[in-house]
Amino acid sequence: MTVFLQQLINGLSLGAIYALIALGYTMVYGTLQLINFAHGEVYMVGAFVALYLARWTGVVDNPSIPGVALVLLGAMAFCAALGMTIERLAYRPLRKSTRLNILITAIGVSLLLQNLGLLLFGPIDTFPTIVPETQWEPMVGLVIRSNDLITLGVTLSLMLGLRHIVEKTQMGRAMRAVSHSRDTAAMMGIPVDRVISFTFALGSVLAAAAAFLVAMDKHVIKPDMGAMGGLKAFVAAVLGGIGSIPGAVLGGFMLGISETLVSGYLASTYRDAIAFGILIIVLLVRPSGLLGRHTVEKV
């Protein structure tokens, strides 16, 4: 029982990361019907921006809550600008092109950012300890880490903020309108380009937060960290139902818990296989995902 609880806690922490990244995929798809494969590299950039901000602001030598918050907000702001730049330069000119052309462009942007990261940042770097970790052992064999609590707390706060933006604000209503029909939204006077740009920025902000939490916990960041992390988050988005915000959250937590249970009871070498195995099963059994809507496309 203790082992199961430990794996469950670890899975919730990992699932929170997947959920944050998956939200970026699902919001962009819901608005543009586009799989933004460069999203994983935005996540990677967020980790390195947080690293350099921590060094430049002196948080490495003098850790403090305001300093850590500044690093997190700075990384989020940079990635928001990066996401909007990618949308404006790479995707907007191809908006009326075929989906295949846009897909190839997304993969190209992903590879470009990954190789630029390797050129600028080097093959690997170490993220400093800016938040000292504390551990509690409420029972024998069960360890609760402060990093896991921080991850869950930050994730929950960001998800509540996202829900407020989508459901309670004017921009959120515009996002839902554009998701339903871009042409109708434009005829109603909604600035579609601005809404789409905001959607990219919002998804990139969540990816930057996930990158900061991972870097703070694991301390090792690499230019290719967005490749596998992004793919697994994409699996989570498909599992929950691509285009569904609650589905992305559900899929992220389900995937994180599944991976940790497989690692704990079988072997860690199977954790990647289980993620893509789940993707194949979902596509075969329920292509629209757990919370996705089944739609019929006219051709």
Image (spheres, rainbow, N blue to C red):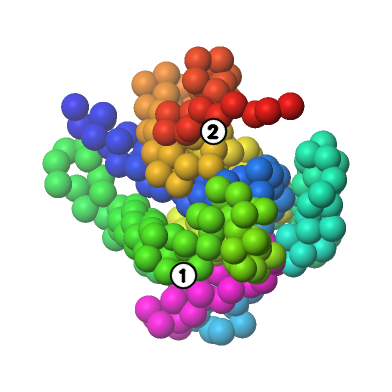
- Going by the numbered disc 2, the residue's amino acid type is Val
Figure quadrant of the N terminus: top left
Report x, y in % for residue 184: 62, 54
Figure quadrant of the C terminus: top right
Q: Is residue 150 left or right of residue 84?
A: left
Question: Given contact means CB atoms under 8 Å apart, are the residues at marks 2 and 1 in contact?
Answer: no
Report x, y in % for residue 291: 42, 33
Is residue 269 in sight in this rendering? no
Report x, y in % for residue 240: 46, 34
Report x, y in % for residue 287: 55, 23
Indicate the secondary structure of the residue bearing disc 1.
Answer: helix
Mark 1 surroundings within 10 Å by alpha-carbon count, few (fewer than 14), some (14 through 19), many (20 or more): few
Towards the viewer: 187 or 3: 187
Indicate the secondary structure of the residue bearing disc 2.
Answer: helix
**Which disc number belongs to residue 170?**
1
Q: Is residue 225 left or right of residue 235?
A: right
Q: Residue furthest left?
A: 139
Residue at 53% across, 56% down: 177
- Going by the numbered disc 1, the residue's amino acid type is Gln
Decide: is 167 above or below 74.
Answer: above
Give the residue number, with chain letter if any, for mark 2: 238
Residue at 47% across, 63% down: 172
Q: Which residues are magenta?
A: 62-84
Decide: is 117 above or below 34.
Answer: below
Q: Main secondary structure of the magenta part?
A: helix
Towards the viewer: 298 or 58: 298
Residue at 44% across, 76% down: 69
Mark 2 surroundings within 10 Å by alpha-carbon count, few (fewer than 14), some (14 through 19), many (20 or more): many
Is residue 240 in sight in this rendering? yes
**Which disc number belongs to residue 143?**
none
Is 73 within the magenta?
yes
